[in-house]
Image (spheres, rainbow, N blue to C red):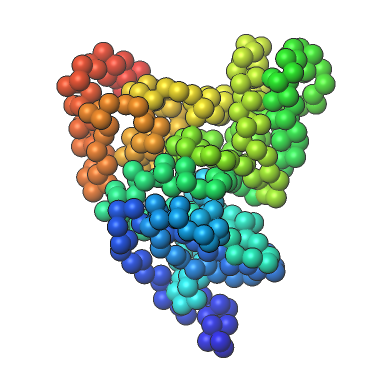
Amino acid sequence: MLKFIFAARDTGALPPYQYSKLATSESIRIIALHQAEAFNDPLHCTIITKDRPGLYKLTDNCLNYYEAISYAWGIPEFTKALICNGNSVSKITPNVDNMLRRLRKKHRVRYLWIDAISLNQADKEEKAQQVPLMSKIYNQAARVLIWLGDEKHCIKESFALIRSFALAQYDNVRIEELITSLPEDWHLILNSLLDRPWFRRRWILQEVAQSRNTTIQCHTEEIGWVWLVDAVSYLKSHTSIQNQPKLSSHSFHALDTVQNIQGKNTDWLDLLWNLDHAECSDPNDRLFALYGLAKSTPENLTPAIDCKIGWNINFTNFATKCAVNGRWFNLVQHVAAFG
């Protein structure tokens, strides 16, 4: 017991966490985030490996009803410590550290799936095996929690604005009438929400598209995803909003992203065209992050997931599949638009 307490205080004395090989192609790791009274208490978790299809049959609701987190990694500086299984440390980014502290409960364990921890990021074979599972992992989660960050500036006002637009959509309120009831700086309030890095992240697309139940959280404030969907539908249906010079380019891209997540277009080339603005650090993810969205695409257009080879080879293989299947015109359109 004394040794455990000492380790919790001096994480530098603990060895790095060593990932074990996943038993099957359907195995996943769930993070049991331990409770703590104070925000600044050390982060502790237990990493549990389970057979994903087998979770359906469990009567332990804690494991069966895990939450999958959708978030932006932030700057890839692994300077913070997460104590795993009481005897080792996993290095995490400041953004993940802050997120876990906000999500941590005071009196009970919280079961989460978080890619930065649940996946062995250094194992390319494991990533290649897990990427096709991502949409299933998010679909099976009891809830997908979108983490927008801990910056709370204008977040209450932003969520109130989203609710106003969503209700206007439901009540058929004219845009001119609605704007007279909004704060004068409503453009800046909306920008403060939609400019957040999460809306520019490519992996969010399938994470949210496959979710059965989605909540948005920023700092300690929450709002249901459906409110944002209805608000975007309202905003996109009014050209006067689209012509607002005070809305940032990031805000317009965010509106497009939300609309595409809810859309029914599942063609690979159309998705690549519509979501060109969505960002990723690994060029391979321009394809891999869309894997769960293109569900009705014919099998012969689906790119093979191979994280061990260069993005240029993966892109070439995908383009070859498109050409062989008569999609030359679409390829030329992409070349002309994006170079």
Q: Is residue 22 above or below residue 334?
A: below
Q: Is residue 66 above or below residue 12?
A: above
Residue at the spot 27% in from the left edge and 42% down from the top edge = 305
- Identified at 44% across, 65% down, the residue is 48
Q: Quadrant of residue 184?
A: top right
Report x, y in % for residue 235. Answer: 64, 19
Horizontal arrangement in the rendering, residue 337 relative to residue 200 (left or right): left
Q: Position of residue 136 (x, y in %)?
A: 41, 44
Q: Which quarter of the figure has residue 148?
A: top right
Q: What residue occupies the far bottom of the structure in this picture?
A: 2
Residue 97 in view here: no
Above or below, 237 against 208 in this view is above
**Taking the image as drawn, is residue 284 in sight?**
yes
Q: Estimate the x, y position of residue 41 in percent, counting from the top left.
A: 64, 70
In the picture shown, does residue 226 fall above or below 86? above
Give percent across and percent down for residue 28. 39, 56
Residue at coordinates 36% horizontally, 30% vertically from top-left?
294
**Is residue 221 shown left or right of residue 149?**
right
The residue sitting at 50% across, 76% down in the picture is 86
Q: Is residue 329 left or right of residue 231?
A: left
Q: Is residue 242 left or right of residue 283?
A: right
**Figure quadrant of the N terminus:** bottom right
